[in-house]
């Protein structure tokens, strides 16, 4: 579903005398339909950088990032911005650690807007079910999530990520701010998505969560800094 | 090279004001339904780019192609003036930073919206009024304000009225110059939400000039970063903002205060 070929990524900090920080070097990674791969490695090794590269959020310096989209393989590393927008809309879902939304929009609308191929009523109904499943009570659905707790915001984010039923889902610490009961619900949702054939790539710091959802782990190791 | 399906294709635009370069070899494409943000500091040439793209200002060099609904390309700067005016009345809309400059302050709110329809040839008073009221509702202005003069409106209401006046003719493409500039943050948030939902629902293409990177992030698919008339970086909005490549973009992004 998704694979990288010799993916390399470095950050060049022009405001710091052009210092160059290599993070990924010739990474070959792949994930299949129905499989969950956990990215592991020490903090700062580049797990989030790899995940963001897969989403096209970070620009690759060399190598390819191939995604199966509408029956064809598209290289995210070289695709035009419009193609990446289309791949994200149709194929590639992403759940980030932090919720970033227009200030005034209610939680239910944020989730419903992320649905794909549904009527508006159906999308809102599905969003309502998802939010309730994630223990966001109905009285919060009409409120903008700016004032919600960290755990609640993360669950809004998860609902928004799962409602789209994308064939590939990228999860950045999906249970980081959640208590055990809510983490359990997310574990079940990930298992259901896998059963439905979704390819999942995730960063899970909680070893218990990781052991229960991941089919295998992929090591991301820190590179020697070479300025 | 011009893509088959682009709405606007600008090539190698240059413009000088005396010795000051306002645009230096700028090329820009826009596709139907796409929102393109033009960002940069004041004096970077972003409003000049907007004015040249929309035919309001003529470049020294370069060409702006526009694809009409029938699919044929027209050079915005060589088409006859009446044709350009007709475009601005129908296919295109322009939202200015200062709504007072766009609205007629001595004409009622409903009149301001209805006037654009009349310019397109609508003559039935009842229909025009009904459509004006419908658009006031869509921009969240109470319909009992339809006969009020805009001078009694707040800044946020004036901007929403300008948007209603712009969209009533169902343009395919809207040019926006700092549409949320000069407004209180709470009013800004409401306006952002309104613009975002209208653009998505009507499948509008838009060129949005803003100095506010968070506005660009929330509204735009793609972004162009301008510095001293040069388009120094262009790409997917979140990629440019989260992984800026050009020194000037890195400076812009790192200069934003975290709220």
Image (cartoon, helix red, strand yellow):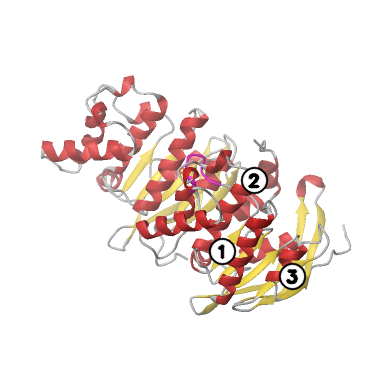
Residue at the spot of label 2 = A150
Drawn side of residue B13 relative to residue B149, left or right? right
Above or below, A53 relative to A148: below
In the rendering, which numbered label is found on residue A108? none
Instruction: Classify residue B51 by image quadrant.
Output: top left
Percent x, y for residue A3?
Answer: 66, 76
Secondary structure type for disc 2: helix
* Same chain check for tags 1 and 3: yes
Residue range in magenta is A101-107
Residue A56 visible somewhere in the drawing: no
Number of residues whose C-alpha sits closer than 10 Å to that of mark 2, classed few (under 14), some (14–19) or many (20 or more): some
Badge nearest the viewer, 1 or 3:
3
- Closest to the observer, A7 or A109: A109
Q: Is mark 1 on a helix, strand or loop?
A: strand
Quadrant of the image for the C terminus of chain B?
top right
Question: Sequence order check: which comes first, mark 2 or mark 3?
Answer: 2
Magenta-drawn stretch contains A102: yes
**Chain letter of disc 1?**
A
In percent of the image, x 53 and y 64: which residue is there?
A88
Q: Mark 3 points at which residue?
A: A211
**Nearest to N terminus: mark 1 or mark 2:** 1
In the displayed orientation, state which residue is furthest to the front.
A181
Question: Foreground residue, B85 or A172?
Answer: A172
Which residue does the numbered mark 1 point to in the structure image? A93
Q: Which of A20 and B231 is in front in this view?
A: A20
Instruction: In the rendered view, tell whether residue B154 sits above or below residue A60.
Output: above
In front of the other: A220 or B165? A220
């Amino acid at each position: 579903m998704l694979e990288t070929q010799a993916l390399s990524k470095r950050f060049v900090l022009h405001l710091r005398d052009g210092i160059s920080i290599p993070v990924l070097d010739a990474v070959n990674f792949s994930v299949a339909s129905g499989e969950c791969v956990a990215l592991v490695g020490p903090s700062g090794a580049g797990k989030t950088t790899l995940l963001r590269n897969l989403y096209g959020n970070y620009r690759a310096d060399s190598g390819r990032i191939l995604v199966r989209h509408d029956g064809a393989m598209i290289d995210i590393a070289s695709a035009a911005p419009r193609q990446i927008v289309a791949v994200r809309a149709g194929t590639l879902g992403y759940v980030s650690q932090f919720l970033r939304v227009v200030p005034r929009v209610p939680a239910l609308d944020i989730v419903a807007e992320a649905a794909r191929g549904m009527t508006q009523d159906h999308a809102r109904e599905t969003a309502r079910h998802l939010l309730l499943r994630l223990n966001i009570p109905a009285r919060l659905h009409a409120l903008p999530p700016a004032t919600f707790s960290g755990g609640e915001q993360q669950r809004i984010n998860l609902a928004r990520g799962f409602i789209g039923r994308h064939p590939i889902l990228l999860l950045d610490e999906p249970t980081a701010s959640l208590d055990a009961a809510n983490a359990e619900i997310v574990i079940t949702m990930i298992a259901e998505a896998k059963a439905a054939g979704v390819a999942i790539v995730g960063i899970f710091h909680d070893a218990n969560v990781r052991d229960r959802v991941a089919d295998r782990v992929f090591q991301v190791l820190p590179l020697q800094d070479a300025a | 090279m011009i893509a088959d399906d682009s709405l606007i294709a600008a090539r190698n635009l240059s413009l000088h004001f005396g010795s000051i370069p306002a645009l230096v070899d700028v090329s820009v494409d826009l596709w139907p339904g796409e929102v393109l943000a033009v960002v940069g500091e004041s004096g970077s040439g972003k409003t000049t780019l907007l004015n040249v793209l929309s035919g309001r200002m003529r470049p020294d060099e370069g060409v702006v192609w526009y694809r009409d609904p029938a699919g044929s390309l027209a050079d915005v700067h060589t088409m006859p003036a009446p044709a350009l005016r007709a475009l601005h009345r129908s296919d295109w809309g322009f939202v200015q930073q200062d709504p007072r400059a766009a609205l007629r302050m001595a004409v009622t709110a409903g009149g301001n919206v209805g006037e654009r329809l009349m310019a397109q040839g609508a003559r039935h008073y009842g229909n025009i009024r009904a459509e004006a009221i419908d658009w006031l509702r869509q921009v969240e202005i109470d319909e009992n304000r339809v006969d009020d003069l805009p001078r009694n409106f707040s800044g946020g209401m004036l901007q929403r009225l300008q948007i209603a006046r712009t969209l009533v003719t169902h343009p395919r493409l809207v040019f926006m110059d700092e549409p949320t500039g000069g407004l209180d943050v709470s009013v800004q948030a409401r306006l952002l939400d309104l613009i975002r939902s209208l653009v998505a629902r009507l499948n509008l293409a838009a060129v949005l000039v803003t100095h506010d990177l968070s506005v660009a992030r929330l509204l735009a698919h793609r972004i162009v970063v301008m510095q001293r008339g040069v388009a120094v970086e262009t790409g997917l909005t979140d990629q440019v903002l989260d992984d800026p490549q050009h020194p000037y973009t890195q400076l812009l992004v790192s200069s934003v205060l975290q709220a």
